[in-house]
Image: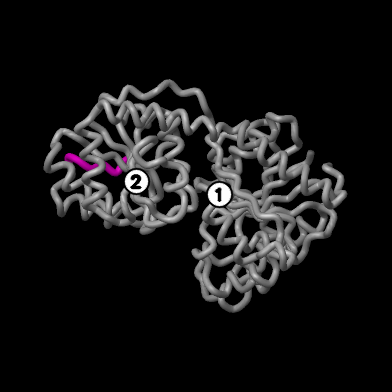
Amino acid sequence: MRIRYLVRFGYGINGITRSVITQANALAAAGHQVEVVSLRRHSERPHFRLDPRVRMFPLIDDFDRDPSWWETAAALDERSAPLLGSGHARLKPPQRFSELEERECARYVGELRDGVLVTTQPPLSLFAIRYGSPHFVHIAQEHVNYDFYGQSMRQLMTEHFGKLDAIVTLTAADAAAYRRAFPADRGGPVIRQIPNALHRWGFPPAPLNRPVISAVGRLQHEKGFDLLIEAFEQVAAAHPDWQLRIYGAGPLKPALRSMIEQRHLYNHVLLMGPSDDLDAEYPKSSLLVLSSRYEGFGLVLLEAMAHGLPVVAFDCPHGPGEIIDHGRTGLLVPPQDVAALAAAVGKLIDSPELRAELGAAGRRKAERYRPEIIARQWEELFAELLAARGIPPG
């Protein structure tokens, strides 16, 4: 079977790219012909490990530009993608897609004649719907909540997403939202929930004997690290020997550092920066906290659970409540409730037995997300859609 993924920044560090490369690697290991097509390339090679059987290439090469090509392309890259309308044009790069990006997507999808194309953001899906032929199966994989999109983007999705073969969401809650927006009895596409997969399985359980708490994510508003630091101020007052380590980079680093200094937590809260090997960092902790205001899924929870770490999370929309069984595989607290978050963390600090119990149960649940298990769900969907359309698998 020939399977293609279209992503925007396939050579960068972001959650969409990481999950797509995990899927691509697992499907290549299962014997399929897999390509990851990156709209842009800004570095020599992808950040995440790519199976050598997976072919990856860019449509726009910013790392190794052809000066003669770029001479005419540069002006198009300054203008907003026409298909996405005036509402999109008001956005700033990199949120805004350019006319050049639309043109190169159109050129690529217009040449496809078999197999499956999985697009990973609404603008990419809209480009493929508008410019693609009817000779391939087109699936939109949605990585964020439906309600996250602005009114103008949702309007475009309403007008065009009915032409998709399928929409795949990460959570059941999002699948329900898309079924309401694109009901089957009005010609809506197939809608399935297929979660993200773990990139690896088989780690030994962490010892859970260090006074360290981990948090992972981009340093931006939705990840709620300001709320976590506020909660940890209460934790540190009762447990001064414990330390919080936050892994990630992002625009809020100066503000978070200032917050740490103002609260005199510089010996308790460390901004560790991004890690190239979180699997080596998780075992150094005794629990993981997710403090997001909202999530597309919450893969970091599963990664920690795969190492046997107990987890605490805000029950924010939409992923944590579907990953964590409260009181059995982790602890959920009301969204943005700082006092409740501090209390849940303190409860685990005070009880090594509870840490071990939740960590072991969480590890058993995380096994359901092994890459080969999730890959089989994708294979079943691909086969169903190809057969329904009578399209050659490639």
Q: Residue at x 73, y 50 (%)?
A: 117
Q: Position of residue 86 (x, y in %)?
A: 59, 78
- Please tell me which residue lies in front, 255 or 139: 139
Tell which tag, 1 or 2, sits nearer the viewer. 2
Residue 305, above or below 317: above
Q: Residues within 10 Å of mark 2 (few under 14, many from 20)?
A: many
| Residue 104, visible in the rendered structure | no
The answer to the question of whether label 1 and label 2 lie on touching residues, with beta carbons closer than 8 A, is: no
Q: Residue at x 32, y 43 (%)?
A: 246
297 with respect to 242 (left or right): right
Q: Residues within 10 Å of mark 1 (few under 14, many from 20)?
A: many
Q: Residue at x 54, y 74 (%)?
A: 151
| Residue 80, visible in the rendered structure | yes
Q: Which residue is mark 1?
A: 170
Q: Inspect the image, locate mark 2, and give the three-letter code of the amino acid beneath it.
A: Leu
Q: Position of residue 301 (x, y in %)?
A: 42, 40
Q: Inspect the image, locate mark 1, and give the three-letter code of the amino acid beneath it.
A: Leu
Q: Which residues are magenta?
A: 267-273
Q: Which residue is mark 2?
A: 332
Q: Position of residue 194 (x, y in %)?
A: 60, 45
Check residue 272 for magenta coloring: yes
